[in-house]
Image (cartoon, rainbow, N blue to C red):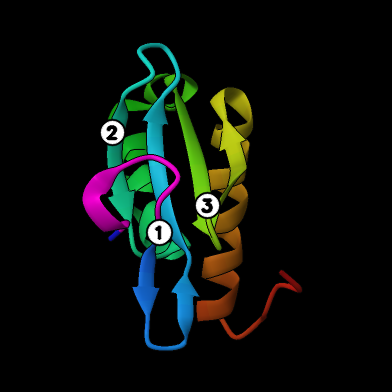
Amino acid sequence: MCQKSAPFRERQGSKGTNPCFQLWDITTGNLVTEFDSEDEAIEALSGVQADDGDDPLLELALFRFQDGRPTLVAKASDLVLYVAARREDNQGVLGGARSPH
């Protein structure tokens, strides 16, 4: 996970820095949770979406941290669409097709 659970930090791997992902509540500005990989984040967000619909995702932002720099992956309604698209990509990989991502 992201080192020390702090914003704008990342974990150090044996080959430099490895990306990590953080999920933030954009309403409160609080860190919700961290993920070791984007696939792990998508899986968790897909579970939330399956259980509770899109509304909870509308209050969230997913950030990727690498080399000391945060990058917004998606937030709010864009996060809903991003999770759906990534879920489809992952299903395509399982079915033998591969997305160009």
Name the residue that disc number 2 marks.
32
In the picture, the quarter occupied by the C terminus is bottom right
Near-viewer residue (70 or 42): 70
Q: Secondary structure at mark 2?
A: strand
47 relative position to 64: left or right? left
In the figure, 52 relative to 43: above or below?
Answer: above
Q: Main secondary structure of the magenta part?
A: loop
- Earlier in the chain: of badge 3 and badge 2, it is 2
Near-viewer residue (77 or 94): 77
Identify which amino acid the numbered label 3 is placed on: Arg
In the figure, 14 relative to 51: above or below?
Answer: below
Name the residue that disc number 1 marks.
10
Considering every residue shown, the one lying at the far left of the view is: 4
Identify which amino acid the numbered label 1 is placed on: Glu
- Spatial CA span between label 2 and label 1: 16 Å
Q: Residues within 10 Å of mark 3 (few under 14, many from 20)?
A: many
Q: Secondary structure at mark 3?
A: strand
Near-viewer residue (46 or 71): 71
